[in-house]
């Protein structure tokens, strides 16, 4: 089980690069407030929001307890509609299945709606290598693909780019269109529409993800605003759906409950423009739709997650809300995480799926402020999971020696009051003395990482305990 | 049975308690509703008002006409108002086929749409007031591409087909015998407003891949 293009071991370097990149910082600043304010408005306009969250969490937990039954029911229903279900244990198996479908269809071009599983398994590179052109059609994904990058946000893949950068990309790649002289948004949009419309019409196979798989009916559900997922599946000969096994919901009623939360949490809309339920290939009398329908159910670490302590992560509906709420994501952006999944959920999910060996920085990429858990519509205890992963990392003895020795020393002192009180009181007085002139300390040994960019406030001179003992009361 | 299927199911079964399939199987056949938001429980003219308000809030326009026979004149009025050619692709639906388009000097072609069609007209299966959402069910009388290919999409909707919540749509599908695997429409599209994106600098732009304009012609019952 691997995640494609995993570079999480470079988190520190990636974060430093992101912080030093003024253009990226300006681009990321647009995220702040925007999504979260819209989410808050959408939440406030639905009085039942919190109750719906409780129900949704219940549905997802119920599904995880009966996942085998629902997957089998889903498979039967897809087959009854004339579709085919494939099972993939890992990324390599999923890639092979999709490639075989494309080869059987004699495909030379594939259009793609947004799918995170495709990013997980590195599908595009694999298809290209086999001589099949894969074209991303979600505008953000298209931009990122032209740039040879990976998406930096689950629902806003190109959030790290501005119109000037996008305009330059279009000029470079759209060689059949006239060069653009300005970066006006309407022009950029018209270019993308024209280029991609041609792609939709020419594609042999259309690949989409799935936000939900309905066990009752065998329908796969996608949620988009652009309509690209629809043109992808309606204009090609073969529709392939890539989905993680945890996307199952029992009934259409359950899907409806989750839909009330998904768009509100993601973009602050009541509903996205297009929510599409697809079942099998086109029927005999239909005028359009694909001739064949395949669903690839992907495990790729999920059954391991199900058996472990972090199974709450399988409730995630990929709304991206925790990314928008995270102060760390807001500064370092998505690429620093070196995984298809960034932000708090990425920091928790990536090590849980791919193991801690290469991802040990990620659980530390959080201040544990708790905003992610607060906004999560699936009530995933992200800070708790990150804390557990840090613990696991420490148990493995894989954290840096300086950190381990430091923490061991600290625990020796903190567990012995006769040692702790004199030491802290001495340190406090010393620091207060050093900073008495300015009230803060611009430099201090061993704290370079902190004082490089800001001053250290100097303490008041006495510890809380000594002041309490002396009779002071708040 | 493939090895992968066996592997995945047995890994899952290591985590689930045995002998509990009954609970899941029962849920699949019961169609139990979860919490319905208060606003989805309106009825009558409140439903129509709520639907109209919600649809207009997502850049759709809504016009009310008193009968199906008035649809061509409303379409003509709309196209002229937007300075668009009087040329439409019309879904081969019984309600739309019998309309007199020529009287309004509209060239109407009954067929599935092609890339060059500027405007497409089709008939909505029903609509959800809670969110201002049109429900389009694919079939011989309703090509799904009509919802996406033309830049202007005109949907004809009967007032009595406006329901409160999405759950009411599923009940309607079940009642019409089209909700079980094998009888389902290939595609059920829930359409809430026009095609849009915020992918460039978080600024909302409309008409990315699908329609730039969505006009809903709401037909009173006769």
Image (tube, rainbow, N blue to C red):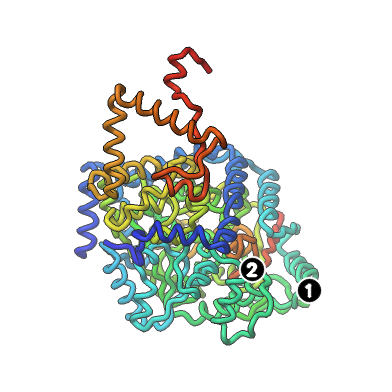
Frontmost residue, A27 versus A312: A27
- Image coordinates of residue B203 in percent, x first then y, are 64, 61
Name the residue: 45% across, 39% down: A55
- Image coordinates of residue B188 in percent, x first then y, are 51, 61
The answer to whether residue A189 is left or right of residue A310 is right
Would you say residue B181 is visible in this rendering? no
Q: Mark 2 points at which residue?
A: B207
Name the residue: 24% across, 57% down: B8
Q: How far apart are marks 2 and 1 (CA)?
A: 17 Å
Name the residue: 70% across, 55% down: B56
Q: Tell me the crowding category of disc 1: few under 14, some 14 to 19, or many 20 or more residues within 10 angstroms, Cα based.
A: few
Task: Point out the residue furthest to the top here.
Answer: A471
- Image coordinates of residue B77 in percent, x first then y, are 79, 68
Establish if A223 lies above or below A130.
above
Q: Name the residue under label 1.
A: B83
Frontmost residue, A353 versus A95: A353
The answer to whether residue A2 is left or right of residue A267 is left
């Amino acid at each position: 089980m691997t995640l494609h293009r995993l570079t999480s071991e470079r988190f520190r370097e990636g974060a430093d690069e992101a912080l030093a990149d003024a253009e990226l910082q300006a681009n990321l600043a647009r995220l702040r407030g925007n999504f979260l304010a819209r989410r808050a408005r959408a939440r406030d306009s639905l009085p039942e929001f919190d109750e719906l969250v409780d129900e949704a969490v219940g549905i997802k937990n119920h599904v995880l307890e009966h996942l085998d039954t629902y997957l089998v029911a889903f498979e039967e229903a897809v087959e009854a509609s004339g579709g085919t279900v494939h099972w993939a244990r890992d990324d390599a198996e999923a890639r092979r299945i999709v490639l075989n479908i494309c080869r059987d269809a004699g495909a030379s071009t594939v259009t793609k709606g947004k799918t995170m599983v495709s990013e997980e398994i590195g599908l595009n590179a694999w298809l290209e290598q086999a001589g099949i052109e894969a074209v991303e059609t979600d505008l953000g994904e298209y931009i990122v693909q032209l740039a040879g990058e990976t998406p930096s946000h689950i629902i806003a893949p190109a959030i790290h780019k501005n119109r000037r950068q996008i305009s330059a990309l279009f000029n470079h790649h759209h060689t059949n269109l006239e060069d653009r002289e300005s970066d006006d948004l309407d022009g950029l949009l018209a270019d993308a529409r024209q280029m991609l419309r041609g792609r939709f019409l020419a594609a042999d196979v259309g690949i989409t993800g799935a936000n939900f798989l309905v066990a009752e009916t065998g329908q796969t559900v996608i949620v988009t605003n652009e309509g690209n997922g629809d043109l992808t599946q309606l204009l090609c000969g073969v529709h392939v759906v890539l989905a993680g096994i945890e996307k199952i919901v029992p009934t259409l009623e359950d899907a409806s409950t989750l839909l009330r939360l998904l768009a509100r949490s993601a973009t602050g809309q009541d509903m996205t423009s297009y929510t599409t339920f697809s079942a099998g290939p086109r029927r005999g009398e239909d005028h359009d739709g694909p001739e064949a329908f395949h669903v690839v159910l992907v495990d790729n670490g999920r059954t391991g997650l199900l058996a472990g302590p972090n199974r709450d992560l399988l409730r995630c509906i990929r709304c991206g809300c925790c990314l928008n709420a995270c102060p760390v994501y807001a500064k370092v952006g998505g690429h620093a995480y070196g995984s298809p999944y960034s932000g708090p959920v990425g920091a928790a999910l990536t090590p849980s799926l791919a193991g801690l060996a290469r991802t040990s920085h990620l659980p530390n990429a959080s201040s544990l402020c708790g905003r992610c858990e607060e906004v999560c519509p699936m009530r995933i205890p992200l800070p708790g999971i990150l804390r557990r992963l840090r613990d696991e990392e420490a148990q493995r003895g894989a954290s840096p020696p300086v950190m381990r020795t430091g923490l061991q020393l600290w625990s020796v002192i903190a567990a012995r009051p006769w040692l702790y009180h004199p030491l802290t009181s001495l340190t406090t007085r010393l620091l207060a003395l050093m900073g008495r002139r300015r009230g803060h300390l611009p430099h201090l040994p061993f704290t370079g990482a902190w004082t490089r960019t800001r001053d250290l406030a100097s303490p008041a001179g006495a510890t809380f305990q000594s002041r309490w003992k002396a009779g002071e009361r708040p | 049975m493939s090895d992968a299927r066996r592997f995945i199911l047995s890994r899952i079964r290591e985590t689930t308690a045995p002998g509990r399939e009954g609970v899941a199987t029962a849920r699949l056949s019961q169609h139990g509703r979860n919490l319905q938001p208060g606003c989805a429980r309106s009825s009558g003219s409140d439903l129509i008002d709520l639907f109209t308000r919600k649809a207009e809030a997502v850049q759709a326009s809504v016009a009310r006409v008193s009968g199906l026979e008035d649809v061509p004149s409303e379409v003509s009025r709309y196209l002229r108002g937007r300075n668009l050619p009087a040329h439409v692709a019309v879904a081969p639906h019984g309600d739309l086929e019998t309309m007199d388009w020529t009287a309004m000097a509209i060239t109407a072609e009954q067929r599935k749409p092609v890339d060059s069609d500027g405007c497409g007209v089709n008939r909505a299966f029903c609509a959800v007031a809670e969110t201002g959402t049109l429900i389009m069910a694919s079939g011989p009388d309703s090509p799904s591409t009509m919802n996406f290919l033309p830049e202007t999409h005109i949907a004809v909707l009967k007032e009595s087909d406006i329901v409160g919540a999405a759950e009411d749509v599923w009940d309607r599908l079940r009642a019409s015998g089209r909700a079980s695997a094998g009888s389902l429409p290939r595609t059920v599209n829930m359409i809430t407003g026009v095609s849009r994106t915020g992918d460039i600098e978080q600024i909302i732009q409309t008409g990315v891949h699908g329609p730039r304009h969505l006009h809903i012609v709401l037909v009173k019952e006769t």
